[in-house]
Amino acid sequence: MKITKAIFSGSSRVATDRPQPRLPEFAFIGRSNVGKSSLINMLCNNGSLAHTSSKPGKTQLINHFQINEKWYLVDLPGYGYAKLSKKIRAELDDIIRGYINGSAELVNLFVLLDSRHDIQPIDLRFMMELGEAEVPFSIIYTKGDKLSATSLSKQIKNNNETLMEYWEELPPFFVSSSVKGTGREEILNYIETLL
Ligand code: GTP
Ligand code: MG
């Protein structure tokens, strides 16, 4: 699929305030700093669409980007950044859960995991919650440029084994690099199959 038009449609704190018109949505979630906003920019070929930062905790609202006038990419705040105050973390958790549980338009949630690290308990807990709420999700291993091909496949194999301890079947998964553009076609083609 080709993205011919990508525009920022608005930020919201609660799902009911999301922009009109209502269209199918594909959202990105994961720990703070995992690369959600960068991936949206990479998919749209636009480095300044979503705001990114080397410091965790950058995205603090629900941000909708309308694609080809037909569907939305949705950038969400990250979870699990210990350095934010308890109050702000609780607010972000409310925003994330409110979005996920109040989105009839949500077609698929991409859960982003840093391909350099083992899956963290907070990621596993989050995915278990998604399973219980029957929210369809897939996994994207981010920052694939940061390790060698051998270490990458080893780490992914390792993580998939961890996931298999909790799930009978692996969710679809992708590897991405927002620096190199890796995974762009696979992810966009996957979205197209779900539209
Ligand atoms: P929050 O909004 O804070 O939750 O973070 P985020 O998940 O949106 O992360 P963001 O896209 O802002 O990226 C965080 C940092 O990681 C930035 O310094 C990015 O440049 C860097 N980064 C993101 N993706 C990649 C990638 O694929 N490769 C490399 N090398 N760096 C990346
Ligand atoms: Mg962000």
Image: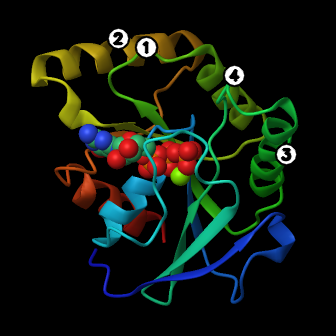
Residue 68 in the image: x percent, y percent? 42, 87
Q: What is the number of the mark on residue 158?
A: 2
Q: Nearer the viewer, residue 77 or 104?
A: 77
Q: Disc 3 or disc 2, which is closer to the eye?
A: 3
Residue highlighted by disc 3 = 91
> At x 67% / y 27%, what residue is drawn?
83
Which structural element holds mark 3?
Answer: helix
Residue highlighted by disc 4 = 125
Asked if the residue under mark 4 is in contact with the one under mark 1, i.e. CB atoms within 8 Å, the reply is: no
The image shows a total of numbered marks equal to 4
Give the residue type that dot 4 points to. Answer: Arg
Give the residue type that dot 3 points to. Answer: Glu
Q: Disc 1 or disc 4, which is closer to the eye?
A: 1
Q: Disc 1 or disc 2, which is closer to the eye?
A: 1
Neighbours of disc 3 within 10 Å: few (<14), some (14-19), many (20+): some
Q: Nearer the viewer, residue 79 or 193?
A: 79
Residue 96 in the image: x percent, y percent? 75, 48
Decide if residue 53 is in sight here.
Answer: yes
Question: Which is more N-terminal, label 2 or label 1?
Answer: 1
Give the residue type that dot 1 points to. Answer: Asp
> At x 65% / y 21%, what residue is drawn?
122
